[in-house]
Image: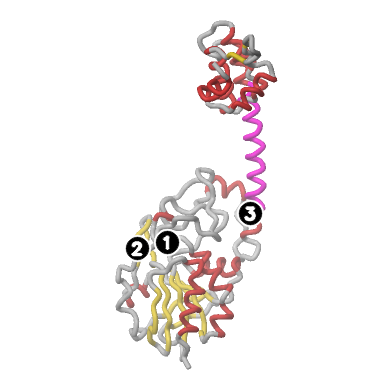
Amino acid sequence: MKIGELAGRAGVTVKAVRYYESLGLVTPRRLANGYRDYTEDDARLVHEIRVLSGLGIPVERTRPFLACLAAGQQHADDCPESLAGYREAVDELTERIEALTARRAILMHHLRQAAYRNSSIPVPDDEAHGKHGKHAKHGKHRERGEHPMSDLYRLPANLPVPEDDGAADHLPGLKMPRIELSSTTGETVGLHALGTGRTVVYVYPLTGRPDADLSYGWDSIPGARGCTAEACDFRDHHHELLAAGARGVFGLSSQDTGYQREVVERLRLPFAMLSDPRLSTAAVLGLPTFAFGGATLFKRLTLVIRDGAIEHVFYPVFPPDEHAQQVLAWMRDNPTA
């Protein structure tokens, strides 16, 4: 058979076949006209080289396997020399895994140091964190190493888009009832007593930490992913929101104040977070919630509160990493004066 046919049958390129020939791994006979003529045995050798290469064995080190076939064995690894080739490849791979594991541990240490540098929370001990650390406050937890850590600052592609289920239709125009929540500033903030003018309160499920994995299934919940990215967007456009007429901005979730304070410090947020662990805001106002991992969490929405009443509601919110810009655009299109 010709070289093109051989390459097609073995699943390699013509260039690869010629490279194997240059190493003396395949030696086709020559016809009278000078053309190469490949046999079924040649095709089997090339196929074996491809399979072994896919396992990480360099082409140059496939010779013992090919010699085993040339000796008439049914399988390329029926010979002791082939088994030695396997062991050599396994040993090299083990060394690489150990080196990569050590490098990963160093990177994790640096990541943790950077993640908590601006936080009042002590940096977790590397060994204790690796053995006992859980990766999310709510939901199904995973031990470190089961899957790659999530990048909280960027949203993955193809997130499910939340649909408007009408759960916030009753909110516009509603007078704010008495609701007092703890703030990361140490004060108690009354949502009913924010004063005149507009205040933006964005409500979110929960924020994670950069050295921890998100709970399994979190990304599949429409509107759940993106709390850190949303906070950063409000941070980056905070001055513009104030210039557009906002009296202030607050984030609100069911996470405790201590957890939220670490988020404010780490992300350098210029505004305070409000803690509502009992979801009293949801109970009093009828805010939409969802259940996950045995916990009840706020669905993402934003309230524009003006003169003690809800002037406008953003629901559903998507994408969260652009939401502050959506609020800013609405405020500019609807000036107070």
- With respect to residue 156, does 3 lie above or below? above
Q: Residue furthest front?
A: 33
Disc 3 to disc 1, how far (Cα)?
24 Å
Report which quarter residue 39 is drawn in. Answer: top right
Q: How many marks?
A: 3
Q: Is residue 129 left or right of residue 203?
A: right
What residue range appears in magenta? 88-110
Q: Residue at x 45, y 60 (%)?
A: 225
Q: Position of residue 268 (x, y in %)?
A: 61, 70
Q: Residues within 10 Å of mark 3 (few under 14, many from 20)?
A: some
Residue 224 is marked as 1
Q: Are marks 2 and 1 in contact (CB under 8 Å)?
A: yes
* Callout 3: SS: helix
Magenta region includes residue 198: no
Q: Main secondary structure of the magenta part?
A: helix
Residue under circle 3?
Answer: 111
- Nearest the viewer among 8 and 178 is 8
Report which quarter residue 240 is drawn in. Answer: bottom right
